[in-house]
Image (cartoon, helix red, strand yellow):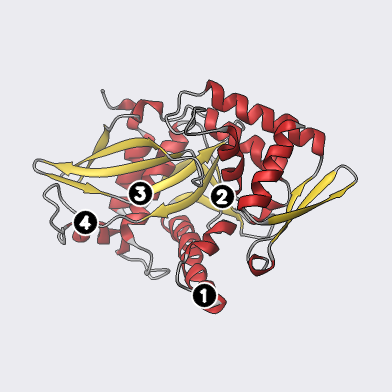
Amino acid sequence: MHLTTLFLTEICKYGEYNYTFEDEKIILIPREDQQYFMPNLIITNVLDFERVLNEYIETIRKTSLSFYRLDSNHQIQDYLFYLIKSLSNDDCQDLISYIKRFIQFLEDKSFSDFNHMKQIGTVSSYDVMARKCEEYYGSETPFTIHYYLEKPGLRIEMPLIRYGISSDKIAYIYSIQRKKIYNNKNCRIKSINTLFNEVNKSIKENRNITPSMLCSLTIFLGMLQSEGINYIKADGFLTRRYGYFEGITEDEKRDLILHNSIDKFFKTFIRLSIQLNNVNISAYPFDIDSYMHIKLEENISSDNILLNDLFNVGKNYKLLKK
């Protein structure tokens, strides 16, 4: 039970939890001032938990990922503690299942061709570029996908997507992070908004969605389908995000900030389900669990020319000669 003991020691010392045993179950209880936003953490079976922690550490030993290495600067206890940094409400209820899924995220090889930036297609007068980046341990996911629009003398960075892919070919999306739009001379670009704003043509619902975020997500859905991944779970609320707002001590203000962020995240998927034919939301958060469930059916298309082109860039990226 070495790893379980080490995990509990780290969580109680640095996460300020207490824990209790109930038969084979362990319940970790956050400190009182965090209980407003952080639920109890449940380990449903101690022996199973020890086994899955061993699998997790063994995966780190074998992986070639830069930010998951055991050495003098990154020791086992660091990786154990930072496991709790990316929990959804559902994950808190079953840490064993969460760690099993995170191991699958670490082992996933999807989009490995994009460890260096590559072109995946062309839209309007721009080349569409993609790059898969590793994330530091403790982040929501081990990987992000970044998109860029390029033409001579100009590179525009689009919003990145934080994702994980499980062994049963389900894509988990946790955030679409907007970037400021700059060119390679670090000057703000305004004209590119003319292109992105084309996604708002002939649409009345949810027009407050950031167009560039919609564009990045559309490309990513196409790339997922090209990999045979047609089921997505999206969850914009990870419990630890509540504590990231330094200087905001009032719960009501934190609630409002998080509500607006999560609402916009889910509405991005709702907006795409309206504009992309055969992208269907099969369940909303808390219908089944805390995730929004999205299915990608065959023959996805859009009446919006830009979204249709972006989806096809993602869907057909393998056809582009490298």
Q: Which of marks 1 and 4 is nearer the N terminus?
A: 4
- Tell me the quarter of the image containing the N terminus: top right
Give the amino acid type for the residue marked by disc 2 in the picture.
Lys
Q: Earlier in the sequence, mark 2 or mark 3?
A: 2
Between disc 1 and disc 3, the foreground one is 1
Q: Which of marks 1 and 3 is nearer the N terminus?
A: 3
Between disc 2 and disc 4, the foreground one is 2
Instruction: Report which residue position mark 1 lands on.
Output: 249
Where does residue 180 sit, x and y in percent of width and height? 26, 57
Instruction: Report which residue position mark 2 lands on.
Output: 85
Q: How far apart are marks 2 and 4 (CA)?
A: 37 Å
Look at 52% across and 40% down and name the residue there: 164
CB under 8 Å between discs 1 and 3: no
Apparent side of residue 106 relative to residue 290 in the rendered image (left or right): left
Q: Earlier in the sequence, mark 2 or mark 4?
A: 2
Q: Is mark 4 on a helix, strand or loop?
A: helix
Where does residue 170 sit, x and y in percent of width and height? 57, 39
Q: Distance between the residues labelled 1 and 4?
A: 40 Å
Q: Distance between the residues labelled 1 and 3?
A: 33 Å
Image height of 216 relative to 230, above or below: below
Crowding at mark 3 (Cα within 10 Å: few <14, some 14-19, many 20+)? many
- Tell me the quarter of the image containing the C terminus: top left
Between disc 2 and disc 3, the foreground one is 2
Q: Distance between the residues labelled 2 and 3?
A: 25 Å
CB under 8 Å between discs 3 and 4: no
Q: What element carries label 3?
A: helix
Apparent side of residue 39 relative to residue 310 in the rendered image (left or right): right
Q: Is mark 1 on a helix, strand or loop?
A: loop
Where does residue 141 sit, x and y in percent of width and height? 50, 42
Instruction: Report which residue position mark 3 lands on.
Output: 216
